Amino acid sequence: MYARIGLVIFLEKGEQDRMRIKKVINNNILCTIDEKGSEMIVTGRGIGFQKHRGERIDADAVERVYRMEGKAEQKKLRELVEQIPLEHLRLTEELIAYIQSNMKQKLNESILITLSDHISFAIKRKQDGVEFSNPLKGAIMAYYPTEYHMGQYCLKVISERLQVSLHEDEAAFIALHIVNAELNTNMSEMYDITRLIEGSISIVEFYYKKQFDRDSLDFSRFVVHLRYFAQRLFQGKTMPDMEDEQDILFRRLIARNCKQHYKCAQCIGEYIQNTYGKTLSEEELIYLTIHLKRINMDAEE
């Protein structure tokens, strides 16, 4: 049996001795398989030197073992370690361990692949004199403040360890990778989610003729609701309309007693229909209405 600590696998000596080489990636990285055919990436100084497919590994030379649960992810990891410096993978692993220790939500294991790839590519671009700006930086800072601060931490560590000062906008890109790993989405979906949140916030502020306090608890709660609402929307998992008589009565009651907020929810629904071609169920509109009422409770009082 092996123990997983974060993204790294720790094997007993006997288990390491039973692993065979599937592919020598370079002198310091091997792709191996165990007795059950499970693939793992093994790193260690000189571990692949003069080694060949089918041979057993030198257990004493093993420093780290990486194993993804999904076969598709394991294939991506194998391809990644063939393309990026090992120090970038190891540094990213340490950064992820720090990030996870400061996050309540468990991160998807694929962040090791996506974030290592992003950081390595960002470093290469920096060395080539090419830097990207992030047009969503302001929105990311507002909607994902914890993740953005983690991104800033990553830039600081990268600068200290590798003497590479990445553009500050990279903190926003890293933040999206973290949120992506929290929500189990892909990066394209994350951009859509962020834009939907931004569009919805703009509608709400225009409708109520006021601006949110970005540091308030109410704003944070509303953004969290929009985040998971948008995730459901883009993954086709929105809440369907319940046909139970009590549910129908509840929806009618909320729509009647919270007319102003229900109308704002409908405005968001129209925006989503026009922008993304997706129709909201009455159930989703009612939940939006309840959250809109909640963020306006102080004004109503």
Image (cartoon, grey):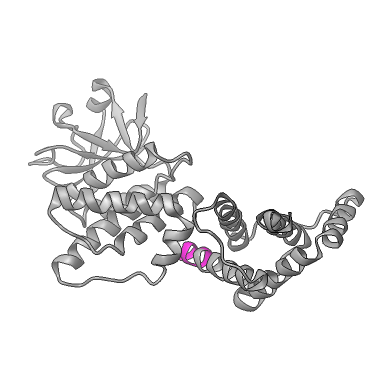
Where is residue 45 drawn, in percent x and y?
A: 11, 38
> Hey, which quadrant is residue 22 in on the image?
top left
> Which residue sits at x=77%, y=65%?
262
The one nearer the camera, 280 or 51, is: 280
Asked if the magenta segment contains residue 190, the reply would be yes
Q: Is residue 76 visible?
A: no
Where is residue 17 drawn, in percent x and y?
A: 22, 26
> Which residue sits at x=49%, y=51%?
184
Quarter of the picture holding the C terminus: bottom right
Q: Which residues are magenta?
A: 187-193
Quarter of the picture holding the N terminus: top left
Name the main secondary structure of what is drawn in magenta.
helix
91 sits left or right of 182 in the view:
left
2 sits left or right of 83 in the view:
right
**Vertical relation: 81 (above or below) 269:** above
Where is residue 298 drawn, in percent x and y?
A: 68, 54
52 sits left or right of 34 in the view:
left
> Hey, which quadrant is residue 60 in on the image?
top left
